[in-house]
Image: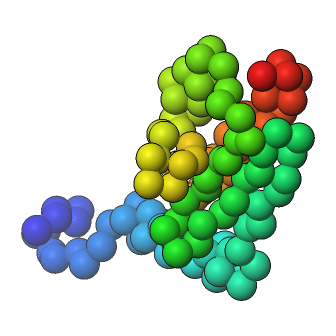
């Protein structure tokens, strides 16, 4: 029970609790809209000089395929800085699909092209 003035009258919700609930409801509604839009227009991969980026929607992975083996320094960059992991099964560097993963794939391909690795 919450004390209301001088009596111990039961108050169902405090004012801040309702405000927080409304904010959470609105946040979740917006997130659902974003997820629906993403499902309707899935991200696409792209080709770059020296390889390609593929969006494997079945396995929910961003995969980077290189024509030749990248330098050791570049592979360390993929692993340590961008959280890509090597998949021997697919023969590609991969990471779970997300907006951040797509950004990381763009960053990796741009750096690969800049280094000429």
What's the image's color scheme? rainbow
Q: Is residue 101 above or below residue 76?
A: below
Quarter of the image for the N terminus: give it: bottom left
Would residue 111 appear left or right of 65 to someone viewing this image? Answer: right
**Number of numbered callouts drawn:** 0
Identity of the residue drawn at 73% across and 53% down: 53
Using the image as rendered, state which of residue 47 and residue 57 is in the foreground: 47
Residue 90: in sight, yes or no? yes
Task: Determine whether, in the image, residue 50 is placed left or right of residue 57.
Answer: right
The quadrant holding residue 75 is top right
Quadrant of res 8: bottom left
Work out whether residue 107 can be spotted. Answer: no
Answer above or below: position of 43 versus 47.
Answer: below
Q: Image point 65% across, 31% down: which residue? A: 69
- The one nearer the camera, 110 or 32, is 110
Foreground of the two, 4 or 107: 107
Residue 102 screen position, x and y as percent: 69, 51
> What is the x, y in percent for residue 79?
52, 29
> 73 or 27: which is nearer to us?
73
- The x, y position of residue 64, in whole percent, is 66, 47
- Looking at the image, which residue is at 16% across and 62% down? 3
Who's the residue at 79% across and 28% down the image? 112
Q: Residue 22's spot in the image, x, y percent?
A: 50, 73
Residue found at the very far front of the displayed protein: 68
Residue found at the very far top of the displayed protein: 73
Residue 50 found in image quarter = top right
């Amino acid at each position: 029970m919450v004390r209301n003035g001088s009596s111990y009258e039961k108050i169902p919700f405090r004012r801040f609790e309702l405000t927080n609930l409304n904010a959470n409801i609105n946040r979740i509604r917006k997130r659902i809209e974003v997820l629906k839009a993403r499902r309707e227009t899935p991200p696409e991969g792209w080709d770059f000089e020296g390889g390609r980026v593929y969006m494997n929607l079945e396995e929910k992975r961003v995969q980077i395929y290189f024509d030749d083996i990248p330098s050791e320094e570049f592979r360390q960059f993929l692993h340590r800085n961008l959280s890509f992991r090597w998949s021997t099964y697919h023969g590609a560097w991969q990471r779970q699909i997300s907006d951040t993963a797509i950004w990381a794939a763009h960053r990796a391909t741009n750096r690969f092209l800049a280094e000429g690795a």
